[in-house]
Amino acid sequence: MVNPDSRIWVTGMAWTTALGSALDPVWELLLDDACGISDVPSPLPLRNTRAAVVPGVPLDFPASHRQHELTRSTLSAALADAGIEPDDPALLPVLGTSYGAHLDLAETASLSEWSAAAVRDAGVPAEPVTVTTACSAGSDAILTGLALLQEGAAELCVCGGADVLTLGKRLGHSRLGTMAPDGLRAFDARHNGTVLGEGAAFLVLEPAARARARGIRPRGVLAGAASSNDAASAVAPDPSGSNVVLAVERALRTAHITPADVSVVNAHGSGTPVNDDVEARAYARLFAEVPRPPVVFATKGAFGHTLGATGAIEAVAVLQALATSMAPPVHGLREPIPQLGLPMPAQQPMKIDQGYGISVTLGFGGFNTCLVLQGPGSATP
């Protein structure tokens, strides 16, 4: 039995996406099957000029400036949502990105200065922990914060990820062939690649006892987290899906639950046939014996693939799903691939049961991370 006071609450959260930054209005747009992907002209030829751009941060600004502003503003919004002053001496930031602005810079003196500068401008005096694990970086920042809190190495953390759209990233995915020639249709029989996006999301993590003493009503509970690495390729995942299964099983064990306790899964859902097939096979194995299997959804068809921010954005989406008991439709889904065989909303949102939610991210280099979350109702004493 887990001591309620030792649980880690999510006491604040914020996101910045191609559909906006307000938590509930963006969630309503997702439930309405909205899409933030549009045509973004490129000076160089690409497989597809569509992308998901954050409004309000001009695309013609330098990438480093855009990374800074996305990080600073979203982190500040998460702290405000939690009622935490940025200069709280207990606060430790843990920030993740994939390449951020670095891929398009001629020289890079530091791979962590972006995060240090952003937290300084947000008014946080502590030096941040910086995580770079490809597209699972946002999730791994949250996992790292959870571990620091559970081990007593921190009292209060703000964790998440930020990443920006750049020409170098678009050109790289175009040349790799991972970019779709038309649109992102995760888990659909017509899937043929991903579409890039940008964004940021941060969660404030706090021990339940500390949050109760402040009189805070939480956004939810971070019940567990774990990861694995299959090291099958620099870019392609292990086709068996075994290491995705391993990451999820490890995460469920840290939360002291079984697959039968999971009511909703926010899948990585990148839209590439290889990744979709790996995930589908993994979830089919994980939930094969569950009498009432979880609903699976994915948000990249709406937000684009936000690279190092994606895991944090999807953690917020899981908490919103648990809070509203609804999973948004998978944008572009018309004919689900048969490998999955689990309920998945198409064109309309789907009701979900009360229980636990998991968010799964898969990064280049075989980085597989799973976060286990509970809704706000589970955080009562």
Image (cartoon, rainbow, N blue to C red):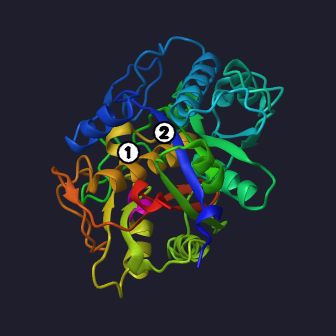
The residue positioned 23% from the left and 44% from the top of the image is 31
- Mark 1 lies on residue: 300
Q: Looking at the picture, how far across and down is residue 290, in whole percent?
A: 34, 84
| Segment colored magenta | 272-276
- Mark 2 lies on residue: 306
Residue 290, above or below 98 = below
Q: Is residue 273 magenta?
A: yes
Q: Count residues near mark 1 (Cα–Cα under 10 Å), then give few for <14, some for 14-19, many for 20+.
A: many
Residue 202, above or below 262 = above
In the image, is 42 to the left or to the right of 98? left
In the image, is 327 to the left or to the right of 133? left
Relative to the observer, which residue lies in front, 37 or 82? 82
Q: Are marks 2 and 1 in contact (CB under 8 Å)?
A: yes
The residue positioned 57% from the left and 73% from the top of the image is 243
**Residue at the extreme bottom:** 289
Q: Looking at the picture, how far across and down is residue 359, in whole percent?
A: 47, 58
